[in-house]
Amino acid sequence: MHGWLILDKPIGLGSTQAVSAVKRALRASGYDVSKRGIKVGHGGTLDPLATGVLPIALGEATKLAGRMLDSDKVYDFTVTFGAETDTLDLEGKVVAESAVRPTLAQVEAVLPRFTGPIEQVPPAYSALKVDGERAYDRARAGEAVVLASRSVTIHSLVRVQEEGPHPTLSREGGRGLSAPAPSPAFAGEGRDEGLLLPLDHVTLTAHVSKGTYIRSLARDIALALGTVGHVTMLHRTKAGPFTFENAISLDKLAELGQARALEDKLLPLRAGLDDIPALSLSPDQAGLLRQGRVLIGIAADDGSYFATSEEIPVALVEVENREVRVVRGFNL
């Protein structure tokens, strides 16, 4: 079992819990998931209140999980205006309020300011470490946590044209928060009239680089509009090369485990490297790489490659000046 299972993570489930669910399904299929058995890991954390695409790496694919953390992501998210919480989402308590509600025209005018390279301060409630401790642990202990800003890239940021129901929009969050009903701006008025009506919330789609916090993006958009806000829906639609096309629900995962049919939904190791060209090697060349040797005189341009031999993955390699070196080897 070497490859990827793509989960459609439901609300309320943490990424570590999702890994545990996959392990249970593997056990049901008769696989060993002990320390000496199949390794399982996730390719990018999703908060419990977030939903959507969560890649789960199995076996040798776990060696590529780090690359998945570095990949671009695409999210749909709803910013609800009028209240900011300490966690910047529905879980937290209100720390600031405002009666200001932006219009759709104002929202659309401000979005270009958050497109391209930007500086962003991560949420205090995040997994980033401060002096060796997780920021969220310090925040929960009552400490005032202020993290350094970081450079991220927002490749695109657009308003969702047609709002549909999302599982979190009607969910009551921690401390009694809940998202309001849709604004009249989405109730059928003409385009010009709708642009000038105040919004309680807006739903956006963002294509972002690694390290981007959507909760911080929502906070900063609200502040730029002269109000405050927090995330009331967060839905990941793409993680690296993975989309909903091959995603399965937890119920389907359990069903496949009981039927011993998990392989039916297992994507190959190569699926996590669709942006990297393949490099075909002879068995002798593959053997040398597996020994940690450097191949010399290989006719390939400089760059990263997915090296295979007779369709079997050998290694993720780097070519420079016709020399091939292993970046990450696969034991297959």
Image (spheres, rainbow, N blue to C red):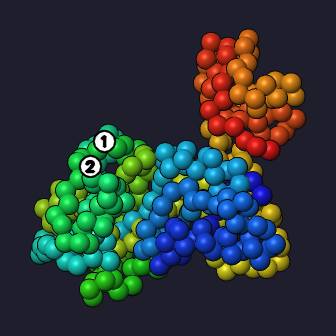
Q: Quadrant of the image for the N terminus?
A: bottom right
**Residue bearing the label numbered 1:** 151
- Measured from the top left, where is residue 18 in percent x and y? 57, 71
The kind of residue tagged 2 is: Gln
Q: Position of residue 77 (x, y in %)?
A: 39, 65
Callout 1: helix, strand or loop?
Answer: strand
Front residue of this view, candidates 80 and 271? 271
For residue 219, side relative to residue 321 (left or right): left
Which residue lies under the disc numbered 2? 120
Relative side of 2 to 121, left or right: right
Q: Foreground residue, 210 or 146?
A: 146
CA separation in Å, label 1 and label 2: 6 Å
Quadrant for residue 132, please give it: bottom left
Q: Earlier in the sequence, mark 1 or mark 2?
A: 2
Q: Nearer the viewer, residue 20 or 302?
A: 20
> At numbered mark 2, what does the secondary structure look like: helix, strand or loop?
strand
Could you tell me which residue is drawn at 37 percent across and 46 percent down? 154
Which amino acid type is marked by label 1?
Answer: Ser
Work out whether residue 189 can be spotted: no
Taking 70 as reference, is 17 above or below it?
A: below
Q: Can I make out residue 171 in this image?
A: yes
Q: Position of residue 225 (x, y in %)?
A: 17, 60
